[in-house]
């Protein structure tokens, strides 16, 4: 059988075809990861629909609804008549001082295989208002009379299904709590009518105790002239967001604590409240949309982020799949050149398929086990398989062990990249440089023209053609 004139070109084309096929396989695994992550989002939505969704808290604030009535003369001559007219006036007052103390406990919910981060929050809101005599509006029309209802203290929430307990007390006196905030911008919540005489010359002090369930995030609106929020939780992976980051915070394996301290000079939340806007979700609007248009009351808070979500980690791992395959092929090709072996493209395909299968094993195992354990099991299985197969491809037991150790090193490097997300780029770049330097050092004495001429004139023994028999196979 004649030797091809350009054996390296044919081999390169065959390996390119193998690589394209493996790339399609990796893309299929990525599609599975995306599909499973989509099902996780569906599970999160289902839990939110049946329990409570992200919670956004606005209040407490005082609101009073008034009505001005007056008579006006319309028409002239025989058509002249007197008409009664009315206009509705809603007056709101944000507290001068708002203090919030909240403590959340993580209560994960499960929907099938999927875990959804939920929480139970015990919240104490203490508010103080300056004397509220200005909540008695004056008539704007001649002969007008203004009649007002009783002032109400309200707290607005984004999802009232999460309310487990709500108490409002005024100067130590507990008030009757009614459903609905009565606030047009965000009607969900609760309110209580204030007793007669609270709009005098004395400051008003109120306290709201609230037990609340929610999922994913908790946000608050800094409507006070001075707002202080102290938030504690047993969740060790907070993601602070919204319009304001905490002034100070501490994060440990046991949880986190955060403290916000804001003044009316830094936020327009009170003005947006008086304009009747609803509270922004934590992930809702850009700074320009909130600040310029005033479409919602700006908020801040925390998301209960899960950094070791198996689908996020698996997706990140799969993106390194092609690099894994290329590095493995480079290593096998280097051995093929240095030891004058012939490794068939089908053998490259089998090796690449084992590497691609690792990522599918990782996704499936991580749905049932902790990600670190799932990664270790999938890596051990594929490393053992490739070490066993490499023994026959490379014609030696030592070669198979070295090949398996190299694959294990690649899996270890990938796990390090996944854990150190912030340093992944620099570590990956350094790793690629080291690999390239090693290849260049190993091939520095090779005369490639002479090697190509030798490959045209001779027929090296294919890998696996003379595999030594195992003792147990006799």
Image: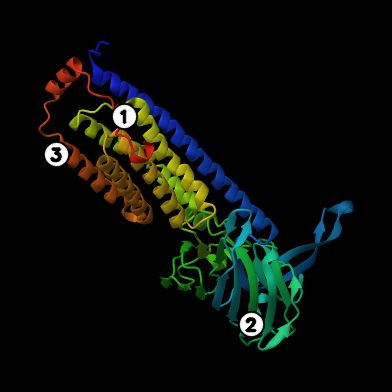
Q: Residue 464 carries which label?
A: 1
Please name which of the two marks, 3 or 1, marks the residue nearer to the observer. Answer: 1
Answer yes or no: is residue 183 visible.
no
Q: Residue 441 carries which label?
A: 3
Place of residue 103 in the rendered image (x, y in percent of width and height, measured from the top left) = 55, 75
Label 3, label 2: how far apart the Cα atoms are? 76 Å
Q: Are marks 2 and 1 in contact (CB under 8 Å)?
A: no
Name the one closer to the observer, 280 or 239. 239
- From this view, report whether residue 469 is shown above or below residue 109: above
Q: Quadrant of residue 142?
A: bottom right
Which residue shows up at 44% across the image and 36% down it? 26
Mark before the other along the chain sequence, 3 or 2: 2
Name the one closer to the observer, 468 or 146. 468
**Dot 3: element:** helix
**Dot 1: element:** loop
Label 3, label 1: how far apart the Cα atoms are? 27 Å
Q: Which mark is residue 206?
A: 2
Mark before the other along the chain sequence, 3 or 1: 3
Which residue shows up at 34% across the image and 26% down it? 345
Place of residue 71 in the rendered image (x, y in percent of width and height, measured from the top left) = 81, 64
- From this view, report whether residue 451 is shown above or below residue 408: above
Q: Are marks 3 and 1 in contact (CB under 8 Å)?
A: no
Place of residue 454 in the rendered image (x, y in percent of width and height, measured from the top left) = 15, 19
The colour scheme applied to this rendered structure is rainbow
- How packed mark 1 is, by other alpha carbons closer than 10 Å (few <14, some 14-19, many 20 or more), is some
- From this view, report whether residue 83 is shown above or below residue 405: below
Q: In which quarter of the image is residue 143?
A: bottom right
Label 2, label 1: how far apart the Cα atoms are? 83 Å
């Amino acid at each position: 059988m004649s030797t091809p004139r350009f054996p390296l070109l044919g081999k390169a084309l065959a390996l390119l075809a193998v690589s394209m096929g493996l790339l399609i396989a990796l893309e299929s695994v990525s599609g599975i990861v995306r599909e499973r992550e989509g099902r996780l989002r569906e599970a999160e939505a289902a839990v939110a629909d049946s329990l409570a969704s992200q919670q956004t808290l606005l209040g407490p604030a005082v609101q009073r609804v008034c009505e001005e009535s007056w008579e006006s003369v319309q028409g002239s001559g025989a058509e002249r008549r007197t008409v009664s007219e009315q206009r509705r006036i809603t007056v709101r007052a944000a507290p001068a001082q708002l203090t919030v103390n909240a403590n959340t406990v993580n209560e994960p919910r499960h929907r099938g295989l999927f875990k959804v981060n939920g929480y139970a929050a015990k919240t104490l809101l203490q508010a103080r208002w300056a004397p509220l005599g200005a909540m008695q509006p004056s008539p704007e029309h001649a002969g007008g009379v203004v009649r007002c209802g009783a002032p109400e203290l309200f707290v607005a929430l984004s999802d009232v299904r999460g309310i487990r307990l709500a108490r409002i007390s005024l100067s130590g006196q507990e008030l009757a709590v009614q459903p609905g905030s009565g606030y047009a911008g965000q009607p969900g919540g609760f309110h209580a009518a204030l007793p007669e005489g609270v709009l005098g010359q004395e400051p008003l002090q109120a306290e709201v105790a609230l037990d609340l369930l929610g999922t994913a995030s908790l946000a608050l609106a800094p409507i006070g002239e001075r707002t202080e929020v102290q938030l504690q939780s047993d969740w060790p992976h907070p993601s602070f967001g919204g319009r304001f980051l905490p002034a100070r915070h501490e994060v440990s394996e046991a949880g986190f604590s955060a403290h916000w301290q804001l003044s009316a000079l830094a936020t327009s939340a009170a003005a947006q409240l008086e304009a009747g806007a609803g509270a922004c979700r934590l992930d809702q609007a850009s700074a320009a949309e909130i600040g310029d248009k005033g479409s919602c009351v700006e908020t801040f808070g925390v998301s209960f982020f899960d950094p070791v979500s198996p689908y996020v980690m698996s997706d990140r791992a799969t993106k390194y799949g092609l690099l894994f395959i290329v590095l493995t092929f480079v290593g096998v090709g280097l051995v093929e050149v240095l030891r004058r072996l012939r490794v068939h493209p089908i053998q490259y395909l089998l090796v690449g398929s084992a590497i691609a299968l690792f990522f599918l094993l990782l996704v499936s195992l991580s749905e049932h086990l902790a990600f670190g354990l799932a990664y270790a099991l999938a890596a051990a299985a594929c490393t053992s398989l490739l070490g066993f197969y490499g023994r026959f491809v490379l014609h030696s037991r030592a070669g198979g062990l070295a090949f398996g150790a190299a694959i294990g090193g690649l899996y270890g490097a990938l796990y390090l990249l996944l854990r150190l997300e912030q340093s992944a780029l620099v570590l990956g770049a350094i790793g690629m440089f080291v690999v390239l330097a090693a290849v260049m050092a190993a091939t520095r004495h090779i005369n490639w023209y002479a090697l190509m001429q030798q490959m045209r004139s001779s027929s090296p023994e294919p890998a696996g053609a003379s595999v030594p028999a195992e003792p147990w196979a006799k």
